[in-house]
Amino acid sequence: MDEQSPQLKPEWYFWVVNKAIKIAILISGQGSNARNIIQRFENQSDNEIVRVLSTRENPDMALFCAKRNIAFESFESYDETKCLKVLQQDQVDMVVLAGFLKKIGPAMLQAFPNKIINVHPALLPKFGGKGMYGTRVHLAVFDHKESKSGITIHLVNENYDEGEHIAQFECYIDPSDTAKEIESKVRKLETEHFPETVFQFALQLSQRVL
C-alpha cells in the first residue's frame, strides 16, 4: 500500500494591521479640551488631528491650530450639511465633541457610526439631556446635594447624552463645596482623562484584524 501524505489540519492566522486614522474636533467654547487632546496626540501616534471646527470665532484656537498645521474653521451659524462636507473632504474617520453645544443630526450619525465621542460633565444618566451643559450641570449637582460628580465619556447617538458609555471618572464632593468648586473638580477630571480616553479609542479604531 502506498503511503499517503498526512492530512494537515487547517490553521487560522490573524494579523493586526494598523491604519492611521484622521480625527476632527468640534467645539463651541474656548477649546481647552481640544488643546489638551491635540497635545496628547503630538508625536505620540500615527493617528492625527486634522481639523478643528468651531461654532464661533476663536482667534486663539485658530492660531494654536495654525502652529501645528491643523485646519481650523469657524461657522457663523452651524450647518450640519456644510460641516459634514468639510469632514468628508478631509477624509475624517472619527469625530470628537469637546464642548460642542449643537445637536448631532442623522446625517452625521450615519457618516460616523459609533465614531463620534462626547464628554459630559456629570455621571450620566444623572444630569444629562437637552439644555444640560456647562454651569447648569454643576448647579444641578449642587442643588441635589450629590456626594459625588464626575465625567462621562460616551458615544453619540440620536438623543442627548444617551449614547453608550466608554468611561466614567468620579470626584467626591464635600458638603461645603460650591457649584464653582464642583466645576473645578470636574474640569480637572476632563484634563486628566478625556485626552487619554480619546487617544486610546482612536488607537483601537485604527487596529484592523485580518
Image (cartoon, rainbow, N blue to C red):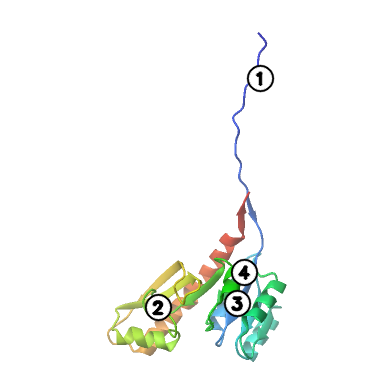
What's the amino acid at mark 4? Answer: Ala
- Mark nearer the N terminus (3 vs 4): 3
The reply to whether dot 4 and dot 2 touch (C-beta < 8 Å) is no
Mark 1 and mark 3 lie on one chain; the one further toward the N terminus is 1
> What amino acid does circle 1 point to?
Ser
Rendering coords of residue 73 (x, y %): 67, 84
71 with respect to 132 (left or right): right
- In the rendered structure, the answer to whether residue 48 lies left or right of residue 188 reads right
| Residue hosting label 1 | 5
Image location (x, y in percent) of residue 32: 55, 83
Q: Which residue is mark 3?
A: 25
Disc nearer the start of the sequence (1/4): 1
Asked if the residue under mark 4 is in contact with the one under mark 1, i.e. CB atoms within 8 Å, the reply is no
- Residue 145, placed above or below residue 164: below
Q: CA distance from mark 1 to mark 4?
A: 52 Å
Q: Whole-percent x and y of residue 54? A: 61, 85
Q: Which residue is under mark 2?
A: 122
Looking at the rendered structure, the secondary structure element under dot 4 is helix
Relative to residue 99, is residue 132 drawn left or right?
left
Q: Which is nearer the N-term, disc 2 or disc 1?
A: 1
Real-space Cα separation, disc 3 to disc 4, in angstroms? 15 Å
Numbered disc in front, either 3 or 4: 4
User: In terms of sequence position, does the residue under pointer 4 or pointer 2 come before the other?
Assistant: 4
| Helix, strand or loop at mark 3 | strand
Identify which residue is drawn at 57% across, 71% down. Answer: 109
